[in-house]
Amino acid sequence: MDFQRLAIQYKTELLGNVVPFWLNKSQDKEYGGYFSCLDKAGKVFDTDKFVWLQAREVWLFSMLYNRVEQKPEWLECARQGGEFLKKYGHDGFGNWYFSLTTDGKPLIQPYNIFSYTFAAMAFAQLGLATGNDEYTSLARQTYDRILERQDNPKGRYNKAVPGTRNLKNFALPMIMCNLNLEMEHLLGKEFVEESAVTLIDEVMNVFYRPEYGLIVENVNQNGSFSDTFDGRLVNPGHAIEAMWFIMDLAERLDRRDVIDQAQTIILQTLEHGWDKKFGGIFYFMDAKNHPPQQLEWDMKLWWVHLETLIALLKGYHLTGSEENLHWFEKVHDYTWKHFKDTESPEWFGYLNRRGEVTHSLKGGKWKGCFHVPRGLFQCWQTLEKMTWRQ
């Protein structure tokens, strides 16, 4: 496999196509922040602003400025989005709304913990890029609010009746694996490495169910398996994305055993989640192969496939598994064939089971400036490391 050619392919797509799309099409020059609802050509079709997508774009352009090149236009894009979020994104008490009007009025209450996680990530990177203590302070305050809410992430917006079926969800410990590394310059090396031990244990020994060879989305509070719709729910993309977070932590801790386990879980999840009839990775599945309850279960989503490409490359780089290269080639071919728009910039996000585009939008309520550029960046960086080794 020609790693150098692939590295150039991912880098060129990132810097020549995807980043200019968001830089030129998404910025709100009147009120600040970003429009995420963009059609096939990048035209705005709705002006609501979703806080976690605003934060993700602040993070993305700050990260590019910090790790790729100190381009003034990237920093200004991140800074103006950060200023909009700082002013309108929270209630003044560290609670981050879910969505806002175009001019910053709150629309939906702060029920979603991921508005908090991505705000913390955004302001940590923006503070690093600018040296502005106000941004780093906001990142620290938000991180503290996440820790306060981690046992009940939805707080008073939780619809479950207490005491009947108390489940804990995979998404927060998963995202904390990545968030801690992103904020290490604020949290400190010792804190990150100590918390990594706890997070690795929870992901690999609680949410991973060896009896099925799969990571489930929900478990009982005591860590046991819940034989219910929610307890059997498998999101292959989540599981695989988490494994490259885990490998990043395990590499820091020099835990070869954890790297090998993560590598095994990636391959097990792909074997279970790959659509053997039409290709691509299913969105939702049931651990016991009962009928999934999500009507969109068999759709193919952009982020699932991009996160899988990252994980397969990192797994190969760390373990040398030839099976990773086999799977990478298969997922790479499917992803570039079906999600990349050959007529307009940026990528499609949603396909039906047969691989046909169902939504021609390039951004919306859930898809923004994040998974495509981050995926391209991570693949490019790992492929360059593999090129040097080769």
Image (tube, rainbow, N blue to C red):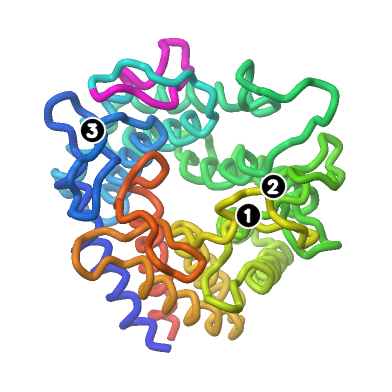
Q: Residues within 10 Å of mark 1 (few under 14, many from 20)?
A: many
N-terminal of the pair, mark 1 or mark 2, is 2
| Image-quadrant location for residue 38 | top left
| Residue 277 rendering spot, x and y as whole percentages | 58, 78
Does residue 248 appear in the picture of this structure? no
Magenta portion: prevailing SS class: loop
Q: Which residue is mark 3?
A: 79
Q: Which amino acid, mark 1?
A: Asn
Q: Which residue is mark 2?
A: 217
Q: CA distance from mark 2 to mark 3?
A: 35 Å
N-terminal of the pair, mark 3 or mark 1, is 3
- Asked whether 124 or 367 is in front, the reply is 367
In screen coordinates, is 122 left or right of 84?
A: right
| Residue 61 rendering spot, x and y as whole percentages | 28, 45
Mark 3 vs mark 1, foreground winner is 1
Give the numbered dot on residue 155. Answer: none
Q: Residues within 10 Å of mark 2 (few under 14, many from 20)?
A: many
* Residue 242 vertical position relative to residue 117 in the rendered view, above or below: below
Q: Which residue is mark 1?
A: 235
Q: Residues within 10 Å of mark 3 (few under 14, many from 20)?
A: many
- Asked whether 243 or 111 is in front, the reply is 111
Give, as a single range, the part of the protein colored magenta: 86-102
Mark 1–mark 2 CB contact (< 8 Å): yes
Q: Residue at position x 33%, y 75% from top?
A: 7
Q: CA distance from mark 3 to mark 1?
A: 34 Å
